[in-house]
Image (cartoon, rainbow, N blue to C red):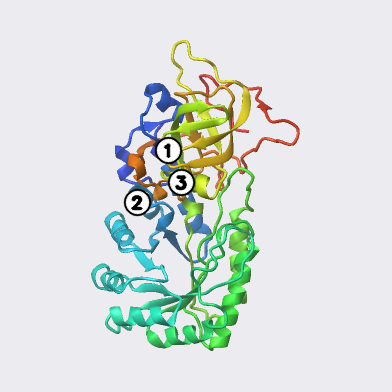
């Protein structure tokens, strides 16, 4: 069954570009058909379509997809086709990308620091009217580069204190609380259209209350400035599921935002925006990599820190892993015993290492394949061509993701217990069958 047919009952629309991709039910089907030489991005457009519909139906405002999370054209098309028609962009190439694959989309240039040339090109050539800023200098730059335009939507990025994020985004951007009132007043005076506030509670936020707390801080800044906001942008930070991290249901985040918005000093026509990235695309993609060599507890793969596994290396992000072995004649059946492995990427750089631990069958060996799940956010988007590697093939799979916030799979990924033993024995065997989720 094609993924379009599988999702017909959900009313989901799958993007046009993916119709040209080869489709497999599972990664194992791909491995059995051929042994791919390059790493393979296994994409699940139905997961993006479902996430888009969920945010469209449950967030009481305008959903701007943060393009940086995954700029694949099929992602842009799938989101646009399923109701997410606003995009948070951070550069001219991202603007051009969205214009090419979602021509009628609404764009918000939300990078708080931009070149004059980029501002002018966005305004005059691409019709962008929404710009973020966090300083008087950037405000003056925007006004000057747009020819003293008065039809601007100016969004002041606030620095806020927030708890519960796996990645703190504090420090680089956001006007400090003591400087915010003067900047808000200046932005209000600089435009005849919308003036708003934005913030970011941090990536992979595990506490819904962080949004309500940040909205309270934004409200205090507006009161001190003596201005009303036309837009309240709660930013991103909406989480996904990884081993050892099971976020609260997304409904709880929506409820916290609703409470925070109701408590803010805003007028009846104030718009509510958000900028989800990870929550829309994390479940959409897994990465199929091949084992080139096994050395004790280390596996050398054909992708790594300079490819789609940047977060696994530099942030030690825990991605779920499972093994696939071709069902050739005489092939060994995978062991039922899991052991912890660390992974090395294909480059000659010594920092190209993913410490894990990644729990895989103890008899995994050269020629076997490792699938790393939940890598749709900041995976392929971070890949480089360092050392001549980084060329990633893309195919579509209809098998569900390893976990899901939207009901496509379980809401947790089990992690082996290591306090009493360093191995985990599996009872069920998987050769020739779809692996059972636990």
Residue drawn at point x = 63 percent, y = 48 percent:
246
Q: Position of residue 193 (x, y in %)?
A: 38, 81
Q: Viewed as shown, does residue 371 lie left or right of 260?
A: left
Q: State the residue at coordinates (47%, 32%).
A: 300
Q: What element carries label 1?
A: loop
Q: Position of residue 311 (x, y in %)?
A: 50, 48
Which residue has dot 2 on it? 77
Q: Where is residue 289 in the image (x, y as percent from the top left)?
A: 44, 33
433, 84: nearer the viewer: 433
Badge 2: few (under 14), some or many (20 or more) residues near its Cα, within 10 Å?
Answer: many
Quadrant, the C terminus? top right
For disc 3, the marked residue is 376
Q: In which quarter of the image is the N terminus?
A: top left
Label 1 sits on residue:
303
Q: Distance between the residues labelled 2 and 1?
A: 27 Å
Q: Quadrant of residue 186?
A: bottom left
Q: Distance between the residues labelled 3 and 1?
A: 15 Å
| Residue at the (27%, 82%) spot, across then down | 147
């Amino acid at each position: 069954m094609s993924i379009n047919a599988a999702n017909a009952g959900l009313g989901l629309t799958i993007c046009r570009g993916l119709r040209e991709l080869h489709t497999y039910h599972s990664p194992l089907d791909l491995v059995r058909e051929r042994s791919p030489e390059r790493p393979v991005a296994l994409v699940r457009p139905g997961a993006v379509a479902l996430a888009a519909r969920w945010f469209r139906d449950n967030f009481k405002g305008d959903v701007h997809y943060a393009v940086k999370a995954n700029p694949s054209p099929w992602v842009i098309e799938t989101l646009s086709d399923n109701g997410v028609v606003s995009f948070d962009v951070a550069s001219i190439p991202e603007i051009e990308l969205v214009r090419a694959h979602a021509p009628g989309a609404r764009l918000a240039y939300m990078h708080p620091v931009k070149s004059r040339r980029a501002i002018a090109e966005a305004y005059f050539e691409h019709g962008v009217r929404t710009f973020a800023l966090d300083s008087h200098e950037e405000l003056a730059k925007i006004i000057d580069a747009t020819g003293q335009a008065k039809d601007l939507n100016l969004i002041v990025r606030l620095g806020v204190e927030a708890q519960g994020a796996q990645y703190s985004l504090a420090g680089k951007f956001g006007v400090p609380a003591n400087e915010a009132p003067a900047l808000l007043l200046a932005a209000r005076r600089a435009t005849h259209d919308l003036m708003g506030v934005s913030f970011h509670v941090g990536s992979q936020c595990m506490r819904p209350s962080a949004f309500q707390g940040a909205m309270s801080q934004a409200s205090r800044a507006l009161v001190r400035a003596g201005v009303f906001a036309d837009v309240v942008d709660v930013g991103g930070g909406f989480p996904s599921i990884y081993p050892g991290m099971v976020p609260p249901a997304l409904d709880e985040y929506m409820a916290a935002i609703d409470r925070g918005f109701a408590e803010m000093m805003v007028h009846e026509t104030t718009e509510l925006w958000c900028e989800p990235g990870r929550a829309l695309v994390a479940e959409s993609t897994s990465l199929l990599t091949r084992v080139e060599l096994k050395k004790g507890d280390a596996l050398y793969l054909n992708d790594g820190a300079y490819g789609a596994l940047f977060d696994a290396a530099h942030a030690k992000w825990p991605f779920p892993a499972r093994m696939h072995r071709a069902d050739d004649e005489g092939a060994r059946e995978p062991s039922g015993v899991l052991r912890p492995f660390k992974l090395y990427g294909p480059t000659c750089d010594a920092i190209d290492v993913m410490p894990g631990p990644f729990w895989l069958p103890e008899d995994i060996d050269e020629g076997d394949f490792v699938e790393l799940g939940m890598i749709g956010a900041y995976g392929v988007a971070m890949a480089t061509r360092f050392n001549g590697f980084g060329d990633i093939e893309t195919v579509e799979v209809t098998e569900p993701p390893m976990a899901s916030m939207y009901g496509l799979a379980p809401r947790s990924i089990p992690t082996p217990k290591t306090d009493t033993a360093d191995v985990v024995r599996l009872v069920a065997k998987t050769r020739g069958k779809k692996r059972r989720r636990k």
